[in-house]
């Protein structure tokens, strides 16, 4: 069912229509980068690395000509170095990254700690988790020196991170979020059953593992990719969507994570073409037509409650049990014959009969992109007009719902989806990794440099081992080298 890849991205900008004010957007992100975030973000204290990703990724999308903007860059080379140091300070000695500075444990606390068993007199307080690790790796690539992308992963403990990632996999193939070693019980995998963790695991694996074969320097035992694929494929629901299991309610975000994880498991290590060829694993989806139908059905005509003749809420007491204000109206007998408004605004939701939300346009459109079915999203203009007329805020950024304040999460995904739509002035985005295509190239070079160093270290150790064998005893200068 793969579409012609030549039509996967628009050849002409989606105009006429409202314009994306890039200068206003950059001012918003500059404020987020350089000023304390409002108190509303206090509940996200444990997700600081994620907040940094939304900010830095958005700035990267908005500044495609970084090399030509060296006089007054929004993120200076000095700031890039400081931000990279900050990200690396979250790395856990046992692999992975903590999601927040408040969860980082002093390194001296790990002096007697064994990474493989986590055993020591006092269990450390620091803890790595899956989302924090993915966002940290993406940030390091986004903050790479323009002149030396190969060093983007300098300081990353590739081996320990991949070993830690493998321990996050459960017997059924799914992945958790965090690890804890329980006395006399072994490793406990926390975080629940969540398709997002499966996507994160596939992403980290693609970013760090490479094509190293067993016995070669840099080889690390892989997690069970076939088990993961089977778990994801078994989570398709009766109506075509994806959820945490086949018995749960499907969600557009989970659909994106399922599709992207499958495509990343067999994605080529080097990206040579855009869009990428369809993933062979995606052909194993039980009901692909139903999935595409479910995704495209997430779109609906947005009706402004202020101008509609229908009641303002589906709840007779005018009290919605939704956390978000109702921003679309279901047809009623009095409004079913009303002609669609002109111009039409197309919004997207994440689940059936739910309200519109900026990020769901991204989850739906990116999922279709990774299926090589992007043209089936339909006409760009009504969806683009909805984002810019109803969601783009006067101070910059995007809101979650019409009339709401902007926030870094929805503002970032407002930009990512407009990039996939081919918005002029924005960097082209990679739909699988949610970063600009240039950043994916940085990841590929950085991974290659890590593997190159592993091979060099392997050869050095071979020479050391040969010297020990020839001498018969260990010279004093070899103490601490780690050769048995």
Image (cartoon, rainbow, N blue to C red):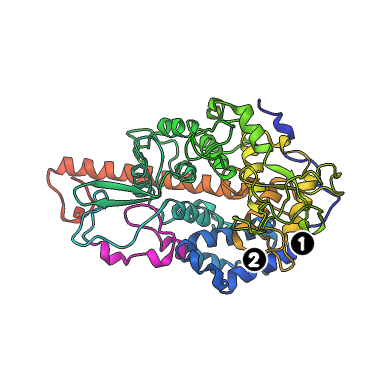
Local secondary structure at mark 2: helix
Picture coordinates of residue 219 (x, y %)? 35, 39
Task: Say which label, 2 or 1, has the lower sequence index.
Answer: 1
* Residue at (74% x, 65% y) in the render: 23
The residue where tag 2 is placed is 29
Q: Position of residue 400 (x, y in %)?
A: 65, 58
Magenta stretch contains residue 378: no
Left or right? Give the position of 319 relative to 188: right
Residue 110 part of the magenta segment: yes
Quadrant of the frame with the N terminus: top right
Magenta segment: 86-111
Quarter occupied by residue 430: top right
At a point 51% along the width and 51% down the height, the residue shown is 150
In the image, residue 16 sits, relative to residue 368, either above or below, namely below
Q: Quadrant of the C terminus?
A: top left
Q: Residue at x 39, y 58 (%)?
A: 91
Residue 474 in view in this figure: yes
- The residue labelled by disc 1 is 21
Q: Nearer the viewer, residue 434 or 156?
A: 434
Viewer-nearest residue: 305 or 469: 305
């Amino acid at each position: 069912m793969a579409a012609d890849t030549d039509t996967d991205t628009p050849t002409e900008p989606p105009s006429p229509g409202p314009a994306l004010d890039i200068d206003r957007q950059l001012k918003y992100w500059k404020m987020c980068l350089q000023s304390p975030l409002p108190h509303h973000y206090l509940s996200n204290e444990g997700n600081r690395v994620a907040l940094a990703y939304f900010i830095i990724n958005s700035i990267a999308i908005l500044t495609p000509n970084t090399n030509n903007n060296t006089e007054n860059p929004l993120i200076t080379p000095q700031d890039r170095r400081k931000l990279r140091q900050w990200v690396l300070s979250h790395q856990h000695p046992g692999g992975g990254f903590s999601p927040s500075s408040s969860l980082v444990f002093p390194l001296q606390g790990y002096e007697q700690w064994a990474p493989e068993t986590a055993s020591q007199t006092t269990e450390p307080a620091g803890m790595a988790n899956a989302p924090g690790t993915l966002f940290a790796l993406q940030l390091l690539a986004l903050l790479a020196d323009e002149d030396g992308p190969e060093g983007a992963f300098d300081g990353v403990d590739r081996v320990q991170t991949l070993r830690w990632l493998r321990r996050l996999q459960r017997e059924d193939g799914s992945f958790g979020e965090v690890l804890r070693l329980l006395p006399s019980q072994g490793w406990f995998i926390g975080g629940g059953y969540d398709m997002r963790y499966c996507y994160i695991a596939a992403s980290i694996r693609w970013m760090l593992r490479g094509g190293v074969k067993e016995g070669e320097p840099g080889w690390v035992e892989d997690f069970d990719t076939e088990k993961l694929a089977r778990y994801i494929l078994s989570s398709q629901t009766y109506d075509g969507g994806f959820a945490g299991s086949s018995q749960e309610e499907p969600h557009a975000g989970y659909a994106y994570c399922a599709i992207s994880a499958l495509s990343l498991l067999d994605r080529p290590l080097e990206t040579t073409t855009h869009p990428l060829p369809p993933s062979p694993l995606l052909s194993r989806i039980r009901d692909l037509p139903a999935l595409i139908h479910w995704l495209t059905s997430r779109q609906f005509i947005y009706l402004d409650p202020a101008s509609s003749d229908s009641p303002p809420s589906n709840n007779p007491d005018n009290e919605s049990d939704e956390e978000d204000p109702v921003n679309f109206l279901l047809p009623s007998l009095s409004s079913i014959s009303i002609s669609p408004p002109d111009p039409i605004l197309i919004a997207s939701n994440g689940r059936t009969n739910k309200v519109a939300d900026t990020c769901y346009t991204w989850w739906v459109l990116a999922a279709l992109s990774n299926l090589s079915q992007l043209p089936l999203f339909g006409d760009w203009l009504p969806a683009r007009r909805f984002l810019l007329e109803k969601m783009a805020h006067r101070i910059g950024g995007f809101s979650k719902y019409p009339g709401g304040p902007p926030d870094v999460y929805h503002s970032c995904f407002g930009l990512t989806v407009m990039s996939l739509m081919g918005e002029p002035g924005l960097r082209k985005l990679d739909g699988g990794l949610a970063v600009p295509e240039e950043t994916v190239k940085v990841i590929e070079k950085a991974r290659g440099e890590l593997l190159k160093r592993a091979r060099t270290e392997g050869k050095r150790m071979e020479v050391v081992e040969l010297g020990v064998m020839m001498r018969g005893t260990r010279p004093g200068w070899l103490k601490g080298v780690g050769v048995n």
